[in-house]
Amino acid sequence: MSNTLERQTILIVDDTPDVLSLLTALLKDNYKTQIATNGVNALEILTKPPYPDLILMDVLMPEMGGYETCQRIRETPSLADIPIIFLSSISENQDVAMGLALGATDFIVKPIFPAILLSRVAVHLSLRRKIQLLEAENQQLRASLDVASGSANEAARTIEDEAITPTTPALAEPASANSPIALLRQFARLLDQQDALADEFLTQYQKPLAQIIPSIVLEQVLLHLAAGAPLKAKAQLNELFHLP
């Protein structure tokens, strides 16, 4: 992308020396210019960056005319979004329509009126610059989102590992009263008691345990409790967490 602090570059493609001289003189004060005398020469210039910000191109030229050149430019991903303005003495509607159908951005009929040419060039270059700035902002936003997403995923993995992975050192260390391990130990001790177990579980333990126990294990614990087998529920937890 062109540096927004630099003058934008216009590639002029025409086989008539007088036209090249006129266009260069009109544009040189505000823009950088490049010159090609036919489509083949233009495509050679476009083989490597920096690419022009806009192309002014004649339709009728030797070796390769403007229509074919435009089509090849539009088929090249790195060049496809460069605005192309056709300059031609051909003024038939079908010719103008063909140029636009091939991907031209605008069509100016010769003879060239400087004020009209400069106005249209300025409009298309302004639009291109705004599009480039939006694309740059979108890229920065996507990069920021990728970083944020990666951080969130890493945090989620860390929380999951600390909560349910039996081999993590955190499981072997003394737990605070509010830690997942303390909660599991409290619930395991509760499983040794059968009085009012269902009410105690539903009111105090079910929701927090759902945050730290894999859903399939929690379902099995619930099934054991429903069947009146709290010791089997404790055994299920002990198998996963090695609780005392």
Image (spheres, rainbow, N blue to C red):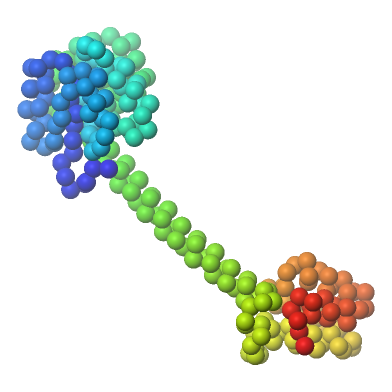
> In screen coordinates, is 12 left or right of 96?
left
Q: At 23% from the left edge and 38% from the top edge, which residue is drawn?
A: 50
- Visible residue check, residue 76: yes
Of residues 97 and 165, the one nearer the viewer is 165
Residue 207, quarter of picture? bottom right
- Quarter of the N terminus within the rendering: top left
Point out residue 192 in the picture as x, y percentages from the top left corner: 86, 88
Relative vertical location of residue 8 with respect to residue 222 in this rendering, above or below: above
Q: At 26% from the left edge and 30% from the top edge, which residue is drawn?
A: 46
Relative vertical location of residue 238 with respect to residue 27 in this rendering, above or below: below
Of residues 167 and 58, the one nearer the viewer is 167
Point out residue 14 in the picture as x, y percentages from the top left corner: 17, 18
Of residues 244 and 86, the one nearer the viewer is 244
Residue 47, quarter of picture? top left
> In screen coordinates, is 92 left or right of 10?
right
- Quarter of the C terminus within the rendering: bottom right
